[in-house]
Amino acid sequence: MSHLALYTFGVLKSPLADPAPLTREFYDIGEAVYRRIGQHPGYLARAEAADGDRGALFEADWGAWGDFAVPTWYGKGHTVETTALAATLSLWTDLRSAFDAIYTGLHREALHRRADWFERTGHANYVFWWVSDGVIPTWRDGVSRLEHLHDHGSAPHAFTFHDSFAPDGTPTRSNAKTAGSWTPGRPGR
């Protein structure tokens, strides 16, 4: 059985250590979103630092998820004081579960606010790929897949909701009548 890996990456307008109200709001909403997503059907796990320090992403112990890594185009800081990014790495049972968790409820509300917190970079901000049961994706895997998606577009190796693939590499499409369900066929747009 395969599981779906999801890596997300965004460049924040201000460092994580910034005490400004928007940064605090981002954290508060983020913590609530993580709690909700962690209870969502189809959610399996996410990378969490052992110490849980805000902003200590590069120095943190991520266990089986590997050393923290970022795309080559990230040009902001790497210290606790200068890091200005938000990244997640998670495992899901399938595309529908991930879609439902991301585009409903509190996370959907947060997505509507992303322009308040994130810079526009011209790069994809998420990527999916399939992993075998028991495999824990690493941060470096996520970065590699996101960069591949940016350079080459969607493929079974790295894809988006709009141009998705089944575990066997077969293109799938979104069924608009039942948002979040996927069927074999030509990728949807």
Image: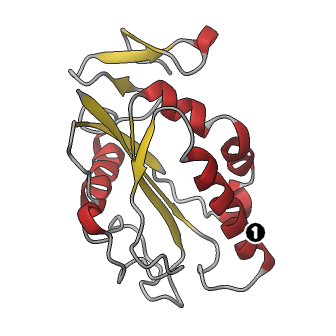
Q: Pick whichever, 17 or 60, lies toward us.
A: 60
Residue 20 % position (x, y): 76, 82
Q: Residue at x 42, y 35 (%)?
A: 160
Q: Would you name the residue on which mark 1 appears?
A: 25
Can residue 162 be seen? no
Q: Amino acid at mark 1?
A: Glu
Q: Residue furthest right?
A: 21
Q: Is residue 135 above or below residue 86?
A: above
Q: How many marks?
A: 1
Can residue 168 be seen? yes
Q: Residue at x 52, y 32 (%)?
A: 41
Q: Please identify the quarter of the rendering in which residue 163 is found.
A: top left
Mark 1: secondary structure: helix
Q: Residue at x 35, y 84 (%)?
A: 59
**On the picture, is 61 further left or further right than 36?**
left
**On the picture, is 42 further left or further right than 102?**
left
Residue 90 % position (x, y): 40, 49
Residue 24 % position (x, y): 73, 75
Residue 72 % position (x, y): 32, 68
